[in-house]
Image (cartoon, helix red, strand yellow):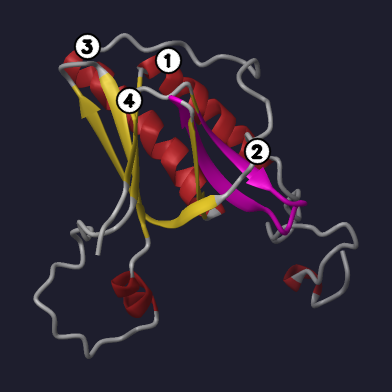
Amino acid sequence: MTHQVHAFEPPERFVAGTVGPPGERTFFLQARGGGRLVSVALEKVQVSLLAEKLEELLSEAQRRFGVDLPEATPVTGDNDPLDTPVDEEFRVGTLGLAFDVDSATVVIEAIAAGEAEAEVELGDADDDTDEDPDEPDDDLDRLRVRLTPDATRAFIERARRVVNAGRPPCPLCGQPLDPAGHLCPRHNGYHR
């Protein structure tokens, strides 16, 4: 089976964004460059963890390799919506991060969820294949993006804004509040 590697080294634009109203949002990573537009779907928690781990990667690169990092900027980055059409190329199963010391760039790789991952999620313990489940399959589609530290910092800031723009959390239980409220376990099921 053939697979596609969508490489943007560097992209004209690389952002996290959503489609849909709060509570029903679908999260995307979108890369644009060279007349191409690639959008891949992922979970909210993946976007949040990606921003967190990119921050850690930049700090580690500064500590170990002396990379000059841009200061965290206030909300002045890319606030534009996702480019249209937002056509999902694949759903992300694995995210990989690396720092290329030679070019002082961050490499982000989003790898499609494979059938093996779906089996593992379903708890299929009878699978006796010799493949290492920690190694991503080379036959899966992937999106590879190479960013400068400045572009990485801008991506982190936008990703955090996108994640935090959802429904506000309940002050008692932390679950998201719907416009009509929710059944709060801290109030024994009474609407909050």
Disc with the residue nearer the chain's start (3 vs 4): 4
The residue positioned farthest toward the left in the image shown = 130
Q: Mark 4 and 2 residues: CB-CB less than 8 Å, in contact?
A: no
Q: Mark 4 and 1 residues: CB-CB less than 8 Å, in contact?
A: no
Disc with the residue nearer the chain's start (4 vs 1): 4
Q: Residue at x 20, y 61 (%)?
A: 134
- Under tag 4, what secondary structure? loop
Three-letter code, disc 3: Gly
Measured in 3D between alpha carbons, the distance from the residue under mark 3 to the one under mark 1, in whole angstroms, is 15 Å
Residue marked by disc 2:
84
Part of the protein shown in magenta: 14-34
Measured in 3D between alpha carbons, the distance from the residue under mark 3 to the one under mark 4, in whole angstroms, is 22 Å
Residue 91 appears left or right of 81: left
Residue marked by disc 3:
66
Disc with the residue nearer the chain's start (3 vs 2): 3
Three-letter code, disc 1: Asp
Three-letter code, disc 2: Thr
In this view, 125 is above or below 173: below
